[in-house]
Amino acid sequence: MVLLKPAEPERMPHVRWLIRRDMQEVMDIENRSFEFPWTEDEFLAQLRNRNCIGAVYESPSDLIHGFMIYELHADCLRLLNLAVAPEVRRTGVGQTMIQRLIDKLSHQRRRFIDVEVRETNLSAQLFLSQAGFRAESVLRRYYDDTIEDGMLFRYS
């Protein structure tokens, strides 16, 4: 007689809180995604803020495919950083993370999400537009590392 082990339920990709042991994969994605990436110290400084939250998109095989850092404010959420590993872009990872933020909005309290994007980051601008964000304003000479302007996008 052969006893069969019951099949384990299939794990689904999911968004969860960022934890310290995720930092190596997060830093790898950050460095492969941006010309001017955040340093690990910049990540940790942001995450020490009381109103700042980090989240990761984890695959069923426990790989981190994307991350986001955002702030909670009284009337809004402010997305500070979002990146998806280059090899899995355009597969729904970014949209899933943005949807997680959108699900946190309510009519009574937090009504919009703000994010600043470099004027040269056209792929991020297109992604945000497709996710329902609107360009609100130009932020002149917004970035410290260049004289580049930023663009404020808002979802409401």
Image (cartoon, rainbow, N blue to C red):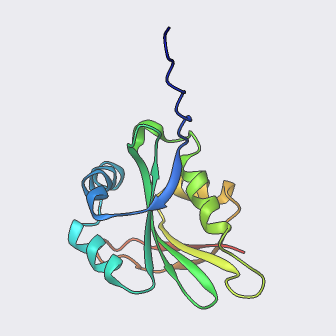
Q: Return the residue nearer the eye: 131 or 117.
A: 131
Q: Is residue 153 left or right of residue 86?
A: right
| Image quarter (top left, top right, bottom left or bottom right) of the C terminus | bottom right
Residue at the far top in the pictured view: 1
The outermost residue toward the bottom is 74
Q: Position of residue 147 (x, y in %)?
A: 34, 74
- Residue at position x 54%, y 27% from top? 6
The picture places residue 125, in percent across and down from the top left corner, at 57, 59
Q: Residue furthest front?
A: 1
Viewer-closest of 101 and 155 = 101
Which residue is found at the position 41% from the left and 41% from the top? Answer: 86
Q: Is residue 84 visible?
A: no
Residue nearest the viewer, comparing 90 with 24:
24
- Horizontal and vertical percent position of residue 66: 44, 51
The answer to which quarter of the image holds residue 108 is: bottom right
Please count the marks in the image: 0
- Tell me: 118 left or right of 91: left
Q: Is residue 32 above or below residue 61?
A: below
Q: Is residue 112 something one can see in this rendering?
A: yes
Position of residue 44 in the picture relative to residue 148 (left or right): left
Residue depicted at 28% across the width and 64% down the height: 20
Residue at 50% across / 8% down in the picture?
1
Q: Is residue 118 above or below residue 59?
A: below
Left or right? Give the position of 81 relative to 138: left
